[in-house]
Image (cartoon, rainbow, N blue to C red):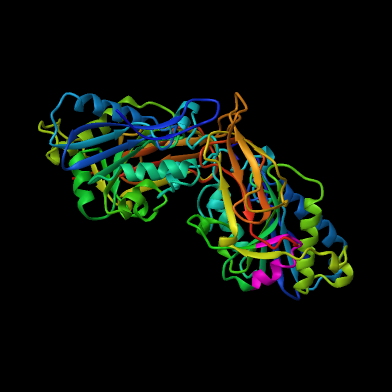
């Protein structure tokens, strides 16, 4: 730092090194405290059961501490989204150097999981994202205690993300942007511990829950996820909650004029399914996403 | 003046994408500025050019877009202030996507001209000499040289990123020129005038303008190998000894990084090559390994 102060990026390592190697990364952006909380809870559990582990578990609780310090998405001063700087550069400014060193440190990993919360304007149902074609991660993600495993086709910004740098990678999301919601970190922590069990790293007797209690997710592709957008400028007032069941034609919410409260648009579900993501921050423009609905069987 | 696109917004009047059109027929040229709301030199360049073109009969068409990101401009932000998205990473855009995707789509459709110019400033932390960046070879190099700006920089990068306007134009087969000059978050009047003169020289060279413009100022015509990059090793307080536009010889003192508390010398920088200072760090607080100065070899 300009004042001479040092900022450390910390990795905590657990296990005996005689088995698969797993890494959990949180805090790539500074407005996802849920992910950081999951990292702490996993660390606490592994600390207690360290001698029972077969393999290596590397936890990086927060790789963007200056952003987390301010509760903002981007690395401050440089104003950069760390999750658009990968694979990074060795001799460059701090965000690029951190990206580079993290990728270097993670070489040889058998499974990477990045834990986030949600985008700062949204609440997300518990979900796992994997890259379409990553069949290993698909199988693992089914044990992550989430409602949905979403196989996603990479988009134009994917190559500059952390998870794209590794063949076997999963992103976990849940909760509301930039806050902690009771129960979310607990559910995702159980999911991570379950993954460690399925990989043979954490034995059955060290799991803090019964395997039958783990959620069985629906597996969906891009064509089952519908983005609902406002066509008007105004305030979005939802009528549903995240993970609510909806039928085709049900009202998800209204866009109203911010001064008069007059309804400008009724946003309806295009298919039967569940609300995967819901906008919490109500100010919308034409084109702003207000919800995602995922087409799943109603009895899920 | 015509309105190319409009987006309703809550709590204020609509967003409008506006352009000024001069002349008619072929060839056609688009000049775009203000994709980033805190880069103002291009806006001034556009208005200087518009004032001149008002008084002349043209053999061709010129469309001028002085300010794309008007909401960013009036709030002093680089990106679209409502969702912090960069319009210059949203191309080719989507007429049914988010706000920035809609704006990008409308702009790309509207600038269907033979030659397209995108004007930027450096970030608010740096200053750049007025320059035009083009690929290594082709018609664009000819146009760049015809502008007679202090620097022509032949580099491939912009063409390859199709999420940016330059890359999007090139992928549509349009000749695209990337102009940069001055510092962000400021008005560099001289740089704006230099860039305006460059555009006028190009219009004369194309036969659009019937009257010649002043002699050109071209000093540098180079690729990356002709540019010396100077990075600081440490963080501290940067005190420069040179400015953009200075000519230096080897050994010339460029500046110093000093201790924030007390001003003690941490690192001194001297030119290794002879040339023109084309890039300079203006903001004095520096982190480790930030770019401070670029010196480019002057043509014989």
A94 or B22, which is in the foreground?
B22
Q: Is residue B109 above or below residue A12?
A: above
B295 or A127, which is in the foreground?
A127
Looking at this view, name the residue that lies furthest to the front.
A249
**Residue A290: x percent and y percent?**
60, 43
**Residue B152: x percent and y percent?**
26, 44
Is residue A54 in sight in this rendering? yes
B21 sits to left or right of B55: right
Is residue B241 in sight in this rendering? no
**Residue B113: x percent and y percent?**
25, 44
B230 or B212, which is in the foreground?
B212
Image quarter hosting the N terminus of chain B:
top left
Q: How many marks?
A: 0
Magenta segment: A136-149
Q: Is residue B164 above or below residue A87?
A: above
B275 or B81, which is in the foreground?
B81
* Image quadrant in which you'd find residue B150: top left
Q: Residue at x 23, y 49 (%)?
A: B140
B60 sits to left or right of A278: left
B223 sits to left or right of A235: left
Image quarter hosting the C terminus of chain B:
top left
**Residue A79: x percent and y percent?**
54, 40
B209 sits to left or right of A11: left
Q: Is residue A140 magenta?
A: yes
Q: Is residue B24 above or below residue B189?
A: below
Q: Is residue A42 magenta?
A: no
């Amino acid at each position: 730092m300009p004042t001479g102060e040092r900022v450390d990026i910390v990795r905590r390592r657990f296990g005996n090194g005689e088995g698969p190697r797993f890494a959990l990364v949180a805090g790539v952006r500074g407005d996802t405290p849920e992910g950081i909380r999951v990292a702490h809870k996993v660390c606490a559990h592994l600390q207690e059961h360290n001698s029972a582990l077969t393999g290596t578990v590397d936890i990086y609780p927060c790789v963007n501490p200056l952003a987390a310090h301010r509760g903002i998405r981007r690395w401050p001063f440089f104003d950069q989204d760390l999750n658009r700087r990968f694979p990074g550069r060795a001799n460059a400014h701090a965000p690029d150097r951190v990206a580079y060193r993290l990728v270097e440190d993670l070489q040889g990993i058998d499974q990477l999981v990045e834990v986030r919360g949600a985008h700062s304007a949204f609440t997300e149902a518990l979900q796992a994202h994997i890259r379409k074609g990553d069949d290993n991660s698909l199988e693992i993600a089914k044990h992550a205690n989430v409602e949905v495993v979403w196989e996603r086709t990479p988009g134009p910004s994917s190559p500059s993300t952390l998870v794209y740098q590794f063949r076997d990678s999963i992103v976990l999301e849940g909760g509301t942007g930039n806050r902690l919601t009771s129960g979310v970190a607990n559910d995702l922590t159980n999911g991570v511990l379950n993954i460690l069990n399925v990989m043979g790293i954490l034995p059955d007797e060290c799991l803090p829950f019964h395997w039958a209690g783990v959620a069985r997710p629906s597996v969906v592709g891009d064509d089952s996820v519908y983005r609902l957008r406002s066509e008007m400028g105004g305030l979005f007032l939802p009528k549903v909650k995240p993970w609510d069941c909806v039928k085709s034609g049900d009202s998800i919410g209204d866009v109203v004029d911010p001064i008069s409260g007059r309804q400008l648009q009724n946003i309806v579900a295009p298919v039967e399914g569940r609300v995967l993501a819901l906008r919490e921050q109500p100010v919308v423009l034409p084109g702003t996403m207000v919800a995602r609905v995922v087409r799943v069987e109603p009895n899920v | 003046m015509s309105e190319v696109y409009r987006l309703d917004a809550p709590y204020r009047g609509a967003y409008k994408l506006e352009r000024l059109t001069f002349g008619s027929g072929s060839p056609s040229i688009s000049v775009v500025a203000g994709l980033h709301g805190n880069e103002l030199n291009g806006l001034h360049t556009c208005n200087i050019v518009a004032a001149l073109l008002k008084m002349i009969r043209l053999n061709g068409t010129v469309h001028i877009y002085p300010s794309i990101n008007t909401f960013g401009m009036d709030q002093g932000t680089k990106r679209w202030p409502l969702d912090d998205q960069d319009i210059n990473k949203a191309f080719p855009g989507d007429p049914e996507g988010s706000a920035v995707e809609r704006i990008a789509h409308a702009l790309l459709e509207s600038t269907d001209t033979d030659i397209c110019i995108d004007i930027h400033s450096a970030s608010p932390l740096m200053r750049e000499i007025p320059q035009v960046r083009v690929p290594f070879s082709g018609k664009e190099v000819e146009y760049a040289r015809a502008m007679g700006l202090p620097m022509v920089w032949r580099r491939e990068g912009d063409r390859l990123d199709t999420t940016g306007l330059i890359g999007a134009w090139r992928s549509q087969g349009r000749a695209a020129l990337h102009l940069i000059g001055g510092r962000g978050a400021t008005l560099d009047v001289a740089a704006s005038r230099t860039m305006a003169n460059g555009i006028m020289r190009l219009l004369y060279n194309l036969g659009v303008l019937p009257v010649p413009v002043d002699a050109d100022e071209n000093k540098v015509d180079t690729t990356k190998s002709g540019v010396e990059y100077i990075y600081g090793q440490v963080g501290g307080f940067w005190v420069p000894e040179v400015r953009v536009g200075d000519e230096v010889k080897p050994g010339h003192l460029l500046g110093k990084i000093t201790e924030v508390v007390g001003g003690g010398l941490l690192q001194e920088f001297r030119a290794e090559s002879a040339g023109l200072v084309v890039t300079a760090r203006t903001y004095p607080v520096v982190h480790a390994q930030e770019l401070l100065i670029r010196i480019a070899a002057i043509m014989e």
